[in-house]
Amino acid sequence: MDKKTVLILCTGNSCRSQMAEALVNHDLGDRVRAISAGTRPQPKVADGAIAALAELGIGAESLYPKDIDAVIDQAIDLVITVCDNAKESCPIFPRAIPSVHMPFHDPHGEPLDSFIAVRDDIRTLLVAEVARRLL
């Protein structure tokens, strides 16, 4: 059985989209593959995002910010934008792909508690939406 692929798109691809990628792959990875990218990727994944994932025992070693151009030609079954800027600047894909906008608070620069709250919102809402749409 081929896995469905979800692209989680954000502006900086350093925080929300990275946590979403890791959570989807952790929770649904036997049936869904998550990738993430940014419209203007930052140099590294936010320390708070890495710490929030580590608290759940989810490693972030494979996570790194990617430009949308690095993934646009992949076989993507669903696009989820997690910030308004990414929604507004979402690229035109080579083929029609279903998309959904699910904005989450940007905890960048805030205490770890903010990252954890956003992580938990992503796990509750976004992971469930991916399961509903792709499984």
Image (tube, helix red, strand yellow):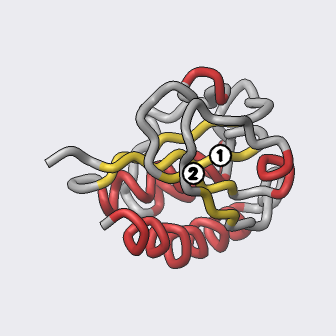
Q: Where residue 46 appears, x then y in whole percent?
A: 68, 42
Along the line of sight, the residue nearer the viewer: 41 or 47: 41
Residue at image location 57% in from the left, 21% down from the top? 70
Question: Crowding near pointer 1: few (<14 within 10 Å), some, many (20+)?
Answer: many
Q: Where residue 126 appears, x then y in whole percent?
A: 54, 69
Q: Residue furthest left?
A: 1
Left/right placement of residue 120 relative to residue 83 reads left
Numbered label attached to residue 38: none
Q: Secondary structure at mark 1?
A: strand
Q: How many marks?
A: 2
Q: Secondary structure at mark 2?
A: strand
Quarter of the figure with the C terminus: bottom left
Q: Is residue 100 visible?
A: yes
Q: What amino acid type is highlighted by mark number 1?
A: Leu
Q: Where residue 121 appears, x then y in whole percent?
A: 60, 75
Residue underneath mark 1 = 9
Along the line of sight, the residue nearer the viewer: 131 or 121: 131
Numbered label attached to residue 79: 2
Along the line of sight, the residue nearer the viewer: 26 or 60: 26
Q: What amino acid type is highlighted by mark number 2?
A: Val
Residue at image location 28% in from the left, 53% down from the top? 29
Q: Is residue 50 visible?
A: no
**Residue 110 higher or lower than 12, as above or below:** below
Along the line of sight, the residue nearer the viewer: 129 or 98: 98
Residue at image location 42% in from the left, 68% down from the top? 133
Q: State the separation of the CA atoms marked 1 and 2.
A: 7 Å
Please state which of the two labelled residues, at mark 1 or mark 2, is closer to the viewer. Answer: 2
Residue 84, picture quadrant: bottom right
Q: Where residue 116 appears, x then y in whole percent?
A: 62, 68
**Residue 125 higher or lower than 26, as above or below:** below
Q: Are marks 1 and 2 in contact (CB under 8 Å)?
A: yes
Left/right placement of residue 106 relative to residue 20 reads right
